[in-house]
């Protein structure tokens, strides 16, 4: 078992849900999504690495039809139960998919929004960005965020040290400028966490 493989995530989710499932249930959707999707008309969305599903529920509650993918069955079961608690309208707009994002590919051009927040990448960041980006429909939005392993403001290792998540440079290198308008590509401090920084990438696929 490596630090971020499927078994490790099952274990992490089991421990977290046992220890503070009630707190996790109350966590709001991430600001990167609520800001990034605020002006978008509801359509079809992919939440790649949905975890306990806060972003998926936020989208479905606003009328999006969401495909939510994660390889941790424990997280998916909890996410589905929480969505069911919001009633059949919201729950009925979500398809839960247990799959490994190291190989799972979205149908080409199927989604108006592809979102992937804080997923640990097993192999190449660029390859994963290209694979997820291929799922965005013309005119649609790609929204990615990753914790940085080193805080750019201090040069110190962050709590994400040793993890491989999406970075601004690798995401930009993977997105063909003839096909993508880059709306945001920056490292942002994490005020809520009080430490660390996130790479945030928002791009629109050109029609
Ligand atoms: C840090 S959590 C983030 C969850 C959610 N996106 C959020 O922002 O709260 C990372 C999630 O990605 C999932 N994950 C990591 N690697 C994955 C992979 N290769 N395939 C599918 N899911 C993966 C984990 O199970 C976990 O739920």
Image (cartoon, grey):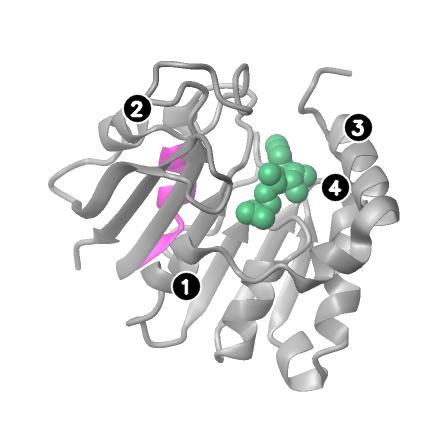
Q: Nearer the viewer, residue 8 or 128?
A: 8
Tell me, yes or no, if residue 100 can be seen here: no
Mark 4 vs mark 2, foreground winner is 2
Q: Which residue is painted at 52% across and 54% down in the image?
A: 47
Helix, strand or loop under label 1: helix
What is the number of the mark on residue 72? 4
Q: CA distance from mark 3 to mark 4?
A: 8 Å
Asked whether residue 172 appears in the rendered view, the answer is: yes
Residue 124 picture location, percent across and down? 44, 20
Question: To which residue does mark 2 refer?
Answer: 153
Determine whether label 3 and label 4 are within 8 Å by CB: no
Please say if 78 is above or below 71: below
Work out whether mark 3 precedes mark 4 in sequence or the reverse, and give the earlier one: 3
Magenta residues? 129-137
User: Residue 26's spot in the image, x, y percent?
Assistant: 68, 63
Q: Residue at x 49, y 48 (%)?
A: 106
Q: Which of the two residues, 44 or 17, is positioned nearer the viewer here? A: 17
Q: Can you say which quadrant of the picture contains the N terminus?
A: top right
Disc nearer the start of the sequence (2/3): 3
Q: State the residue position of label 3.
A: 7
Between marks 1 and 3 in the image, the one whose residue lies nearer the viewer: 1
In whole angstroms, how far apart are the C-alphas of marks 2 and 1?
25 Å
9 shown above or below 74: above
Which disc is residue 34 wearing? 1
Task: Check disc 2: other Cα within 10 Å, few if <14, some if 14-19, many if 20+.
Answer: few
């Amino acid at each position: 078992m490596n630090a971020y493989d499927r078994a490790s995530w099952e274990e992490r989710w089991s421990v977290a849900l046992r220890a503070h499932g009630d707190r996790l249930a109350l966590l709001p959707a991430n600001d990167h999504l609520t800001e990034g999707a605020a002006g978008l008309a509801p359509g079809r969305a992919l939440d790649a690495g949905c975890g306990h599903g806060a972003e998926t529920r936020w989208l479905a509650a606003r009328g999006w039809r969401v495909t939510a993918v994660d390889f941790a069955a424990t997280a998916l079961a909890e996410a589905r139960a929480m969505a069911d608690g919001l009633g059949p309208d919201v729950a009925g707009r979500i398809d839960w998919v247990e799959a490994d994002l190291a190989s799972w590919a979205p149908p080409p051009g199927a989604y108006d929004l592809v979102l992937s927040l804080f997923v640990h990448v097993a192999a190449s960041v660029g390859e994963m960005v290209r694979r997820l980006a291929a799922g965005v429909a013309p005119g649609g939005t790609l929204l990615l965020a990753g914790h940085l392993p080193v805080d750019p403001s201090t040069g110190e290792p962050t709590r994400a040290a040793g993890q491989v998540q999406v970075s601004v440079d690798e995401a930009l290198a993977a997105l063909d400028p003839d096909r993508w308008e880059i709306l945001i590509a920056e490292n942002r401090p994490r005020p809520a966490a009080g430490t660390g920084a996130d790479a945030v990438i928002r791009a629109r696929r050109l029609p």
